[in-house]
Image (spheres, rainbow, N blue to C red):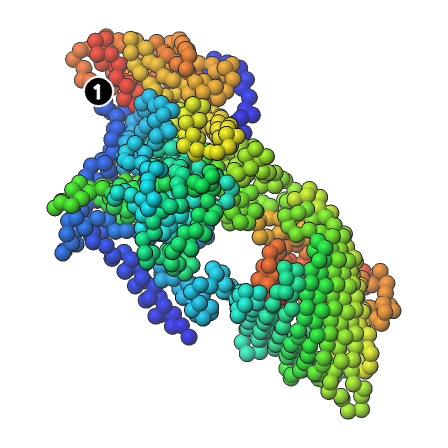
């Protein structure tokens, strides 16, 4: 643990030592300023008016200057002249002096998603590990022992367009939300539960034709429920026990094998090419649990779905207006589907005005309109409006009037999603035929770890 | 902007109203300037004694070398300094090193060259190169000893030592011959304009002329130290532009004096007794923004500058000398491109991290098209990236990140720099570009054309507010000046409508004289101004001798205000001060 007092002393020592260096005494015998002969400048009204405000702002400036600017400056200068980054890189590249620049990179990450626990951590990447084609990525984030997320992947490039990978993750958190099943679940019914989800998989990815790609993966997955919740909300265990909420599979975790296929056909070319084009996506995931529950069939299910979209680059300069429709279904093959594995909306993907897992049922359908425009080299503005909801088995109770609205605006980085940044403010509504009031808002700011 | 500016007929009455308004600022005592010669030489050129720490030999006694932090300079100027200044409500006034003639005296930062004396195109071509030996391109095999790698900078290279004179050789890595040409050409412009800039010259050489000193390493600010061996040399040369078997490089002659590291664009050096003006308040550094805008020297951060210590007796017993300040590493000028195209498009239009544009872009949903949206490569000038005169707006020009001196630029600082830039005729520009030694003549022509077009836009902007009249002389009952806006054809001839008034101390304003203004070729503009017979017993600087002449040219709203003392018919009028109000 870093001692803040020692750190402060260190920083000021650095600053002092920097000023004490050299063979000339500083600040002695400065020449008096020269009289250049220009007439003196009059004091302006602005100068006079500014003084009271300067006095008011002085404490803030003091903090800005001597708590932030000067210490950070001393630290950065020391880090650069001491080659701290290089030293760290040497450690993580195992002292391989011939390592290409940028072999190892690490960035701090932080994510605040209003309604969930925040997290801080880092994203790291090692390139050329063991072989030029091999790279490793790691994300670790935490907010105390009850919120831990570790994800890693090792990717080996078979060619420019093809790779195989091994990935694993463990996510343990107590702030998961569940509001009940069905299109009319209420915001007020929020309950929390604790779970640990682990997965390990091997996969293969190939990109082709413009931005199209196919990806397959197979592996093992575990889900473990724990007692408790968080954030002064009712726990899901209590709510289920009291019969106020139905959560299929709650309390019964699983170990399972799974396989997943994602196929994406995208006619768009990568930036800076104009963003017009069409996109079709389909995915399928089968899960087979390996631990039978006494008196019940061994559970297995399949999730499948897809989306169809079109985008028009209005100016040819990345001002992209896009429409899409998407649907997903979850069908049991045997037994029941645990509620975390049902079709859901919310979170980073569709209907982002809702928290991850806010809407859950056997199927989901969404129609969305999005406008994305560049605001900086690495940053886009994004505005979206979407209508959709979750429904019963095979859209059994689908009704346009039962859909909800999700709309919002924000920033999103347009580069590597592994360390992508997002700032989103969005609001979501109850179903159109059920008061249609805004009952959800979401504020997200931070970096993602989407690999 | 300026280039599209139109001028209506300015009625004389309006001009005189303007003249009258400006005169309202005159105090009871009209003498704003003392009777004395203008300061033409800064005290910082005088040797100054350093107080060495005990035990330091005088020859080792020099200001400390400053190591500039790449990361902190960018982070501080982008994220920390601006809010710190804002919280102090820091305002800045006019530049401090300005003499009574609204000019900058010769100093260790700036020497008045073009415009201050007749300058031939050949002199522009020579730049600082006449001050020392040039690298002999016909040296024998092994004649150029590589004794150092190039640690930092945008382009790869190495240092050679030939008969004791060192030259940093920089190689083109991409964009054809642009980078080497840029550093050679831009150093000519900077030097001719008055700033200190090194002798950077294009050389062609054979591989066999190079000889590598054993055991060399490169130690850059970032990345691991690298061994400089034949393999690395080959990899550097592999990228070089060539003519047959000859490799092309820009040879930058080592600066004289002891290198002290970069100068900063704010505050002063604590250990240089002559450095008494905060750098952000120096006109030469503020005005350098206009020069940087012209050449699109977006990489005008402190790392691309250098201080050198010039000892009075380098090997002697006196610890006396002065610090000279240089612009170096100008290879980014004229359209340098980065690996990320989005940044290359924005160079000169936006900081790397520009919160204003991010916010504006977000709020406007990206509907307005920005210059970087329109940026395209020119078919002929392909090597110059996005360097163009289209969308060039001198007011909106920006470097890589905020520069404290550039941010303090005031109208009169910009106009000062523009008056210097106006002195570059097409022949001067052509001569400077010749230093780039382009293989393809079309590249030479493209660059000359773009520079002249950008110059015109720049002059139209800075001559539109304060008076562009300069080069004042008082002779034969005439006060004459050169209207640079007219001399350079910045505005149509019909835009100029001259008027003048003369206020003599002790006379009511309604008795102001309205002398006729005559014009001639090359922007010559004269006002009849006779000396009067005054009481011979008056002191020379008596207030009754004070004369103020205002000349408006009809294009700039601000007149030229000339201050003189009337020393009588025999000795005539003595010019003591010039002001350029903006209204």
Q: Can the viewer see residue A2 in this picture?
A: yes
Q: Secondary structure beneath disc 1?
A: loop
Q: Quadrant of residue A125?
A: bottom right
Which one is in front, A443 or B217?
A: B217
Q: Quadrant of residue A399?
A: bottom right
What chain does badge 1 belong to? B
In the image, residue B191 sits, relative to residue A69, either above or below, namely above
Q: Residues within 10 Å of mark 1 (few under 14, many from 20)?
A: some
Q: Position of residue A51 (x, y in %)?
A: 38, 45
Which one is in front, A49 or A35?
A: A35
In the image, residue A216 sits, relative to residue A427, either above or below, namely below
Q: Can the viewer see residue B283 in this picture?
A: no
Q: Quadrant of residue A3?
A: bottom left
In the image, residue B492 sits, relative to residue A108, either above or below, namely above
In the image as oriented, which residue stretches furthest toward the right?
Answer: A396
Residue drawn at point x = 76 percent, y = 52 percent: A278
Q: Position of residue A208 (x, y in %)?
A: 71, 58
Residue drawn at point x = 37 percent, y = 40 percent: B251
């Amino acid at each position: 643990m870093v001692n803040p007092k020692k750190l402060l002393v260190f920083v000021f020592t650095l600053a002092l030592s920097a000023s004490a260096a050299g063979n000339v005494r500083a600040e002695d015998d400065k020449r008096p300023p020269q009289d250049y002969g220009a007439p003196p400048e009059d004091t302006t009204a602005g100068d006079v008016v500014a003084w009271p405000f300067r006095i008011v702002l002085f404490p803030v400036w003091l903090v800005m200057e001597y708590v932030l600017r000067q210490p950070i400056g001393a630290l950065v200068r020391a880090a650069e002249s001491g080659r701290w980054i290089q030293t760290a890189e040497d450690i993580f590249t195992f002292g391989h002096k011939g390592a290409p620049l940028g072999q190892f990179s690490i960035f701090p990450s932080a994510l605040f998603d209003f309604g969930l626990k925040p997290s801080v951590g880092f994203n790291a990447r090692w390139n050329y590990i063991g072989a030029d084609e091999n790279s490793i990525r790691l994300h670790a984030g935490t907010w105390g022992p009850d919120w831990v997320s570790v994800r890693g992947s090792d990717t080996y490039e078979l060619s420019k367009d093809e790779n195989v990978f091994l990935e694993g993750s463990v996510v343990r958190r107590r702030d998961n939300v569940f509001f009940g099943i069905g299109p009319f679940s209420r915001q007020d019914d929020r309950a929390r539960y604790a779970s640990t989800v682990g997965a390990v998989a091997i996969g293969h990815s190939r990109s082709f034709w413009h931005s199209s790609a196919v990806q397959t993966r197979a592996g093992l997955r575990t889900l473990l429920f724990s007692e408790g919740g968080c954030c002064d909300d009712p726990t899901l265990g209590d709510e289920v026990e009291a019969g106020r909420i139905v959560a299929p599979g709650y309390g019964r975790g699983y170990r399972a094998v799974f396989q997943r296929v994602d196929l994406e056909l995208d006619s768009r070319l990568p930036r800076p090419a104009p963003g017009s084009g069409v996109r079709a996506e389909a995915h399928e995931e089968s899960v087979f649990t390996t631990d039978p529950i006494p008196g019940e069939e061994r559970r297995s299910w399949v999730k499948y779905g897809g989306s169809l979209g079109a985008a028009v680059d209005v100016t040819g300069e990345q001002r992209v207006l896009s429409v899409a429709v998407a649907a997903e279904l979850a069908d049991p093959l045997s037994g029941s589907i645990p509620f975390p594995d049902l079709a859901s909306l919310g979170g980073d993907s569709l209907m982002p005005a809702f928290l991850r897992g806010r809407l859950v049922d056997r199927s989901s359908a969404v129609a969305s309109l999005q406008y994305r425009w560049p605001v900086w080299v690495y940053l886009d503005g994004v505005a979206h409006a979407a209508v959709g909801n979750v429904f019963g088995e095979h859209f059994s109770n689908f009704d346009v009037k039962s859909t909800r609205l999700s709309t919002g605006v924000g920033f999103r980085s347009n580069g590597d999603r592994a360390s992508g940044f997002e700032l989103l403010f969005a609001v979501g509504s109850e179903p159109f035929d059920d008061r249609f009031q805004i009952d959800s808002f979401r504020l997200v700011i931070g970096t993602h770890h989407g690999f | 902007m300026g280039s599209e500016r139109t001028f209506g007929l300015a009625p004389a009455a309006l001009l005189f109203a303007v003249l009258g308004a400006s005169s309202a600022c005159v105090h009871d005592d009209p003498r704003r300037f003392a009777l004395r010669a203008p300061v033409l030489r800064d005290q910082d050129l005088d040797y100054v004694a350093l107080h060495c720490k005990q035990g330091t030999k005088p020859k080792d006694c020099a200001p400390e070398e400053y190591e500039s932090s790449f990361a902190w300079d960018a982070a501080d100027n982008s994220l920390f300094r601006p809010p710190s200044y804002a919280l102090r409500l820091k305002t800045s006034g006019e530049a401090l090193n300005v003499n009574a003639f609204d000019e900058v005296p010769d100093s260790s930062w700036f020497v008045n060259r073009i415009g201050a004396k007749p300058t031939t195109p050949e002199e522009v071509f020579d730049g600082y190169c006449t001050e020392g030996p040039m690298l002999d391109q016909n040296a024998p095999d092994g004649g150029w000893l590589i004794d150092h790698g190039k640690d930092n900078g945008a382009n790869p290279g190495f240092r050679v030592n030939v008969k004791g004179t060192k030259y940093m050789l920089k190689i083109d890595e991409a964009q054809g011959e642009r980078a080497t040409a840029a550093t050679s050409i831009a150093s000519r412009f900077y030097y001719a304009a008055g700033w200190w800039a090194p002798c950077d010259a294009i050389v062609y050489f054979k591989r066999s002329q190079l000889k590598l000193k054993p055991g060399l390493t490169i130690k850059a600010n970032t990345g691991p130290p690298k061994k400089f061996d034949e393999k690395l040399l080959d990899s550097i040369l592999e990228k070089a532009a060539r003519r047959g078997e000859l490799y092309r490089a820009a040879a930058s002659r080592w600066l004289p004096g002891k290198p002290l590291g970069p100068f900063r664009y704010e505050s002063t050096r604590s250990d240089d007794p002559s450095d008494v003006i905060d750098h952000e308040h120096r006109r030469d550094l503020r005005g350098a923004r206009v020069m940087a805008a012209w050449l699109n020297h977006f990489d005008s951060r402190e790392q691309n500058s250098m201080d050198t210590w010039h000892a009075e007796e380098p090997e002697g017993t006196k610890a006396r000398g002065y610090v000279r300040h240089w612009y170096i590493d100008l290879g980014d000028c004229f359209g340098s491109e980065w690996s990320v195209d989005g940044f290359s498009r924005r160079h000169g239009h936006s900081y790397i991290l520009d919160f204003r544009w991010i916010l504006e872009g977000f709020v406007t949903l990206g509907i307005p098209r920005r210059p970087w949206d329109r940026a395209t490569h020119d078919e002929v000038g392909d090597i110059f990236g996005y360097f163009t005169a289209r969308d060039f707006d001198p007011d909106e020009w920006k470097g890589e990140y905020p520069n404290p001196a550039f941010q303090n630029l005031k109208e009169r600082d910009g106009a000062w720099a523009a008056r210097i830039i106006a002195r570059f005729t097409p022949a001067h520009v052509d001569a400077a570009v010749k230093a780039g030694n382009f293989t393809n003549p079309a590249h030479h022509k493209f660059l000359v054309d773009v520079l002249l077009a950008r110059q015109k836009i720049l002059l139209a902007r800075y001559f539109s507010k304060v008076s562009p009249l300069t080069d004042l002389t008082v002779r034969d009952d005439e006060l004459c000046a050169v209207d640079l806006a007219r001399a350079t054809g910045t505005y149509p001839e019909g835009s100029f409508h001259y008027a003048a008034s003369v206020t003599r101390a002790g006379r009511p304003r309604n008795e102001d004289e309205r002398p006729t203004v005559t014009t001639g070729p090359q922007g010559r503009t004269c006002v009849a101004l006779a000396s009067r017979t005054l009481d011979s017993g008056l002191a020379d600087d008596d207030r009754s001798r004070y004369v103020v002449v205002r000349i408006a040219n009809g294009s700039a709203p601000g007149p030229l205000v000339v201050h003189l003392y009337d020393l009588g018919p025999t000795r005539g009028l003595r010019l003591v001060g010039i002001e350029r109000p903006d209204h």
